[in-house]
Image (cartoon, helix red, strand yellow):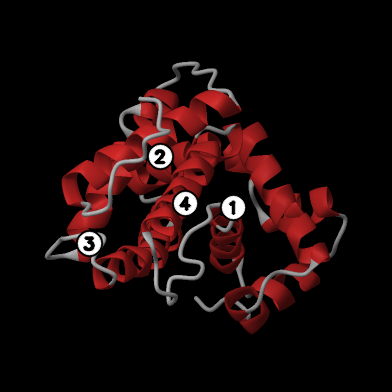
Amino acid sequence: MQASATAEQDAPSARQQAVLDAVLGLMVEDGEQVTMDAVARRASCSKETLYKWFGDRDGLLTATVRWQASRVHAGHDAAQVLDGATLRERLQDFAVTWLEVITGPTSVALNRIAIAHAGSRKSNLGGIVLANGRFAIGERVKPVLEAGRAAGLLAFADSETAFRTFFGLVGRDIQIRLLLGETLDLDGAEIRRDAGRAVEQFLALYGRAKPDPNHQG
């Protein structure tokens, strides 16, 4: 399976974004109906255009997962020399946006379908979500952690282990509770508080930066 060069290498155009949003909308309504025919109808485009842009259904699903994952802010300005405030800001930005994404109905629907398909081997959606969601996000965040270590702000032996710790502190049990049907009404203020708490806990474990005196635990 090969997605088109446009879908793999470049940010999707506005028209392609509309198609990917149509896929996500179908997943929320009825994940089993995400066919090329259904997407073409929902997005008011031809199947030929879908195949031209995305290659095949797996290519379309890959582009969709990447589009959803792009809403998580991770890895920007990782090459710059970080100070304590900038590191904390980068970690907070990732934590807030990741929580916003995973608690939304779109990600809940997408992950439920991926889990079901992984169990039944109905499609490769589970692998696509892992590769282009969790694993790709990890590869974008780890350079930030490594930049923090290079600046003497963090101390860890393995960036993957450090990232997994941070990922767990941010997500806690929220995602599994949502996937199992619990209704969690998290507003923006609560998400920011949870994110800030996770950042401070991570820095307590791995950080050499001074605690934030303004943080409310």
Answer with mark 1 or mark 4, whichever residue precedes in sequence: 1
| Residue corresponding to mark 1 | 71
The image quarter in which residue 4 lies: bottom right
Rendering coords of residue 101 (x, y %): 54, 41
Q: CA distance from mark 2 to mark 3?
A: 27 Å
Q: Which mark is residue 89?
A: 4
Q: Answer left or right for 202 relative to 192.
A: left
User: What residue is drawn where x is 35% and y is 29%?
Assistant: 176
Q: Nearer the viewer, residue 63 or 200?
A: 200
For marks 2 and 4, give the CA distance: 36 Å
Amino acid type assigned to the residue bearing label 1 in the image: Arg
Q: Are marks 2 and 3 in contact (CB under 8 Å)?
A: no
Residue 106, position in %: x, y?
60, 38
Q: Residues within 10 Å of mark 3 (few under 14, many from 20)?
A: some
Query: How many labels sit on residues?
Result: 4
Against 165, residue 182 (above or below) is: above
Q: Disc 1 to disc 2, how far (Cα)?
A: 24 Å
Residue type, mark 4 in image: Glu
In the image, taking residue 25 as reference, residue 133 lies left or right, namely left
The kind of secondary structure element at disc 2 is helix
Q: To which residue does mark 3 refer?
A: 160
Left or right of residue 83, residue 157 in this image: left
